[in-house]
Amino acid sequence: MATKNPSTVPEKTAQLTPQQIVNDGILKVIVATGIDVQKNRYKGMRAIAWQAFANAIESGTFDKLVAQAIINVDQLPAGWEIEAPAKVAPNVASAKKTVVR
């Protein structure tokens, strides 16, 4: 009976998606800082984002980072979407301006 020699089988490495890489990074910040409340996940996200902002400012690429974010805002993964605020109907907006005396 023939068996495969494990040392000759090429090892396949899984390609992580950007979302998986980011989630792993956020988890590392959470574990390292001890923030264990779910809503504090955003603190980990902000810590990483702040460092990215600081690096981009230092390298002179912050404006490019902002432009890329604007261009790619519709391609954010589930749970990361940015929703535009609902527009107020014109009759509601004008009613708010009306002062009752």
Image (cartoon, grey):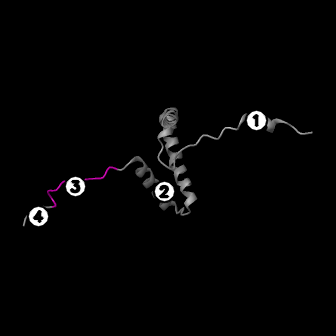
Q: Which amino acid does label 2 sit on?
A: Val
The earlier-in-sequence mark between 1 and 2 is 2
For the residue marked with disc 4, what is the amino acid?
Thr
Magenta highlight range: 6-15
Q: Which quadrant of the rendered structure holds the N terminus?
A: bottom left
* Residue 3 circle label: 4
Q: What secondary structure characterizes most of the magenta part?
A: loop
Disc nearest the viewer among 1 and 4: 1
**Whole-number angstrom distance, CA of label 1 to CA of label 2:** 47 Å
Give the residue at mark 1: 91
Residue reaching furthest to the left: 1
Q: Which mark is residue 11?
A: 3
Q: Mark 2 points at which residue?
A: 29
Please tell me whether mark 3 or mark 4 is closer to you in this view.
4
Residue drawn at 43 percent across, 55 percent down:
24
Which residue is found at the position 87% from the left and 37% from the top? 99
* Distance between mark 3 and mark 1 Cα atoms: 65 Å
Q: Residues within 10 Å of mark 4 (few under 14, many from 20)?
A: few
Mark 1 against mark 2, which lies toward the viewer?
Answer: 1
